[in-house]
Each structure stands twice: as structure tokens, then as C-alpha cells.
Image: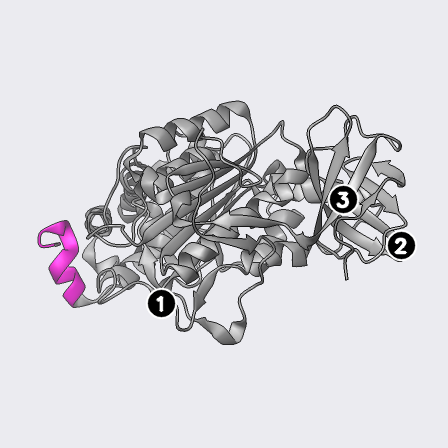
């Protein structure tokens, strides 16, 4: 057992954000510690490794001013916990779960271990129903399903923070209201201007009552970034599985989380794997992503929307590569569309939602949705082939039908993919708009939609 209320002063090493204490008896992995320094506020840390009578501790507030002779380490005998409550909605916290909005911590609720556990596969139920983001290209082509984990792969300079803010403002689960819907945002390594952007959106948007924000800033200790998503997911689990709410968790930017993990691994002098990341990088990411889903006997659900910036736009980099193995699809933002002022710059071709088929169609979105999405994808794919051909032989040498396809591609990007930052489209409006765009093409080439659907929606004359 851990020796509670026992202090140690025999500090052996200081390794970046880590300290090594020797002579420790009974310490446990993940145990919280308090570090007292003369003339400085109390600091907190967590046991990362226990080896015989030595404990390696990560210090959340950093190791600046810590010396071998000026600190006392107190082992608390319990893991890090956070108080979770429905009162967290409409509030703003730092990466450790401490309020930053000038209000006191929630008084009711429970104390929960932030480490949690991935959902037991036996207890899971298959993700069903959809979350409407109000963004046409996502709702139509990569529909987000409740209980799904669907990452957004972005790049430096692309508007992923803008897209996140729009999703927070617009997302809902029904046209009747969102009383049973909540959003939890965990932002890691935010620059000051990015944090101010989220704060302003949080204060002005009407959906703020359903949102809890956990913001870790770039000038905060990097070690705190390893805690932020776990604190946010613990709050989400309470809302979903204790209160029966449908919770959308947005994790941004997972690249900053990965860099913090690599920093700690390097300080621990672990043998590096790909690109210097630790060998347990995959399992660490899985310990976060697998905390999404639906559980038998519970009304609520947790849906994850991780955002990650691909270094050098490289989708084979370990961060997006391993994320793709764990999650159920991806939404990829494209730099070329951004250059052409298309927002959101979603690249349709490599983007997909593997669980989409279980949340769309008759009785859920609309009966024509699956066939319409398939037809748009096929037609847009043909546009890409024609554009490649035009670069070789010129537009004058292609057929009239191919020119019609080129016009279709331009309108699809300008009217369907392109959408205003403050423009919210319902699923019905998105489907009707998609039929308007598709009606640019002749009926005879539309072979993925039924005759009944063409008669009802082609030309958008009777869409409703």
C-alpha cells in the first residue's frame, strides 16, 4: 500500500519536466504527488514509473526553480481526480480542470479518476443516429454518427479552428432542440490569439450553455497537455453515462498532445520508435479514442471529433497514420481548396465516414440520402479525371458532356462545399441543394439513383 502523508526529500535527478525520487516505498503508478518549494506555490505531479525504491514523477507546473535540496515530495495515495458535474456546461476551465472564468468550482457531482477505461467491447452497442453539424459537405458525404470517432486531418495554416468553432455553434441532434445534447472541447497547446478566438466565440454564441471548454495554452507546461484530454473525457463520460446525454467531444490539436508525449518519453530516456515517438504511442492514442461509444443500458453516447495537424501535410506521419487505424474514417482538409477560397476546404475523395451507412436513409435523414451521396461522389470523381485530361489536351478538345461535368464540378465546389462561416444548413436544405447541383448533369448519366428518386427530386422541382 502507498504510504500516505509521508514526505521525501531525497531528490535524485531532474530530467526536463520529470523528477526522480529515491527511497520511496509503496508508490503506485498514476499516483498524485504534491511538491512543496520554499517561497513558491504548491506544485502537483503524477507518478510515471516505479522501479524498486525509485519513483519517476512528471511535474505539471514544470521543474523551474526545483533543486535537489529545496523541495519536499508528498505522495497522496490516490490517482488524479476531477470533480464532474452538469454545472460544468457553460463554463471554461484550464487543462487541469480548474475554472478560469472567475467562478468557483462546481459544488455538486462526483470525484472521478481522470484515467478512465476504454469501453468494454462486450458492453458496446453499435453507433446509430446522426449528429447534424450544419455543414453541408460533412452532413452529406461524411455523416457523423453518435458514438463514432471521426478525426479531421488538417495542416498548418488551414482553418481547422474556424471549422471547430462553427461545429460547436451549429451542432445538434434534432430539429426539436438540444436539451439532451452537450459539447466538450479539449484544446491543447493553443496560441494566445487562438485561445482568444475560442473565448470570444464561447461568450457570444447561443450554444454556450451546452458547452464545456478545457483550454491548455501554448505557454502552459507541455506536460499538462497529457492531462487535458483525459479531464475532458472524464467530464464527458459523466454527462453521457450518468446523466444520459449525447456528448460530442472535440480534441484539438492532437499533434500538440503527441509532441508533449514525445517530450516526456525523451526525458525518460526511452528507446524511440517512428519519428522519435515512444513505442507505446499507438496504445496511448487508443486509450483516448476508445473512450467514445455507446453502452448497453445507457441512453447517452460519446462521439469524438479529434482534430490533428499533419506535419508537412504528410498523411503517412505517425500521428494521422495511427489515428486512422483506431478511428472510423477521416475528414481531410485540402490546401488547394483553401487557396481557391473554398470554405470548409474538405477534400471529398479521401474523406469518409465508415459508420455513415448506419445513421442515414429512410427514417433517419431522408430515403434518398445514401444514393444521392454515392452519385455525387461518382460524378465528382469523373470531374477530377476530366480536369487531369484538360491539362494535357485543353478544354476545347473535350466533349460537350465533359464540359457539362466541369461546370458541375465548379458549382459543386462553389455552392455545396463552399459555405459561409455563419451559415447553418439543415439536413433537408443540404439534400435539396445537392439535388440542385446534381441536376446540372443529364438524367441519363445518373445511374446510382433510382427512377423514383429522379422523378421526385431531379431539377429540385418537388424536393421537400
Judging depth in this view, the residue of 72 and 198 nearest the camera is 72
Nearer-N-terminus badge (2/1): 2
| Residue for badge 3 | 74
Residue located at (63% from left, 30% from top): 220
* Residue mark closest to the camera, 2 vs 1: 2
Determine contact: label 2, label 3, CB under 8 Å. Answer: no
Let me know if residue 461 is in the magenta part. yes
| Residue for badge 1 | 358
| Residue for badge 2 | 53
Q: Alpha-carbon neighbours of circle 3 within 10 Å: few (<14), some, or many (≥20)?
A: many
x and y, in percent, of residue 176 in the image = 19, 53
Q: Main secondary structure of the magenta part?
A: helix
Secondary structure under badge 1? helix
Q: Which residues are magenta?
A: 452-463
Judging depth in this view, the residue of 86 and 75 nearest the camera is 75
Distance, label 3 to label 1, CA atoms, is 51 Å
Let me know if residue 213 is in the magenta part. no
Quarter of image, res 290 = bottom right
Distance, label 2 to label 3, CA atoms, is 15 Å
* Residue mark closest to the camera, 3 vs 1: 3
Distance, label 2 to label 1, CA atoms, is 53 Å
**Residue 316 seen in the figure:** no
Amino acid at each position: 500500500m502507498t504510504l500516505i502523508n509521508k514526505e521525501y526529500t531525497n531528490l535524485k535527478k531532474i530530467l526536463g519536466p520529470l523528477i526522480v525520487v529515491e527511497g520511496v516505498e509503496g508508490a503506485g503508478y498514476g499516483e498524485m504527488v504534491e511538491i512543496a518549494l520554499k517561497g513558491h506555490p504548491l506544485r502537483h505531479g503524477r507518478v510515471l514509473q516505479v522501479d524498486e525504491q525509485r519513483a519517476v514523477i512528471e511535474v505539471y507546473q514544470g521543474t523551474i526553480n526545483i533543486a535537489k535540496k529545496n523541495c519536499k515530495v508528498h505522495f497522496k495515495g490516490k490517482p488524479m481526480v476531477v470533480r464532474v458535474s452538469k454545472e460544468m456546461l457553460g463554463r471554461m476551465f484550464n487543462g487541469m480542470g480548474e475554472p478560469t472564468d472567475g467562478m468557483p468550482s462546481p459544488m455538486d457531482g462526483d470525484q472521478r479518476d481522470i484515467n478512465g477505461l476504454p469501453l468494454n467491447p462486450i458492453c458496446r452497442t453499435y453507433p446509430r443516429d446522426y449528429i447534424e453539424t450544419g455543414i453541408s459537405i460533412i452532413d452529406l458525404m461524411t455523416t457523423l454518427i453518435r458514438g463514432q470517432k471521426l478525426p479531421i486531418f488538417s495542416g498548418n495554416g488551414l482553418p481547422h479552428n474556424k471549422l471547430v468553432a462553427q461545429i460547436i455553434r451549429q451542432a445538434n441532434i434534432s430539429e426539436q432542440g438540444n436539451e439532451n445534447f452537450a459539447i466538450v472541447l479539449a484544446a491543447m497547446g493553443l496560441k494566445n490569439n487562438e485561445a482568444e478566438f475560442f473565448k470570444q466565440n464561447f461568450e457570444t454564441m447561443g450554444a454556450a450553455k451546452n458547452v464545456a471548454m478545457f483550454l491548455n495554452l501554448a505557454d502552459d507546461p507541455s506536460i499538462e497537455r497529457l492531462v487535458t484530454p483525459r479531464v475532458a473525457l472524464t467530464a464527458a463520460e459523466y454527462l453521457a453515462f450518468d446523466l444520459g446525454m449525447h456528448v460530442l467531444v472535440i480534441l484539438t490539436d492532437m499533434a500538440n498532445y503527441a509532441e508533449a508525449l514525445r517530450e516526456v518519453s525523451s526525458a525518460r530516456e526511452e528507446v524511440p520508435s517512428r519519428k522519435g515517438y515512444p513505442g507505446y504511442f499507438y496504445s496511448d492514442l487508443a486509450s483516448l479514442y476508445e473512450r467514445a461509444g455507446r453502452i448497453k443500458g445507457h441512453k447517452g453516447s460519446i462521439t469524438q471529433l479529434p482534430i490533428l495537424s499533419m506535419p508537412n501535410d504528410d498523411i503517412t506521419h505517425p500521428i494521422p497514420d495511427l489515428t486512422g487505424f483506431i478511428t472510423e474514417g477521416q475528414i481531410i482538409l485540402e490546401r488547394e481548396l483553401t487557396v481557391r477560397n473554398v470554405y470548409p476546404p474538405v477534400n471529398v475523395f479521401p474523406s469518409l465516414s465508415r459508420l455513415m451507412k448506419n445513421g442515414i436513409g429512410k427514417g433517419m435523414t431522408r430515403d434518398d440520402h445514401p444514393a444521392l451521396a454515392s452519385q455525387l461522389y461518382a460524378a465528382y470523381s469523373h470531374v477530377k479525371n476530366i480536369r487531369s485530361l484538360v491539362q494535357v489536351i485543353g478544354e476545347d478538345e473535350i466533349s460537350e458532356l465533359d464540359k457539362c461535368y466541369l461546370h458541375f464540378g465548379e458549382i459543386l465546389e462553389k455552392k455545396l462545399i463552399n459555405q459561409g462561416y455563419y451559415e447553418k444548413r439543415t439536413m433537408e436544405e443540404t439534400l435539396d441543394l445537392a439535388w440542385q447541383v446534381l441536376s446540372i448533369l443529364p438524367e441519363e448519366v445518373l445511374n446510382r439513383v433510382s427512377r423514383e428518386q429522379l422523378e421526385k427530386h431531379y431539377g429540385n422541382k418537388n424536393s421537400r
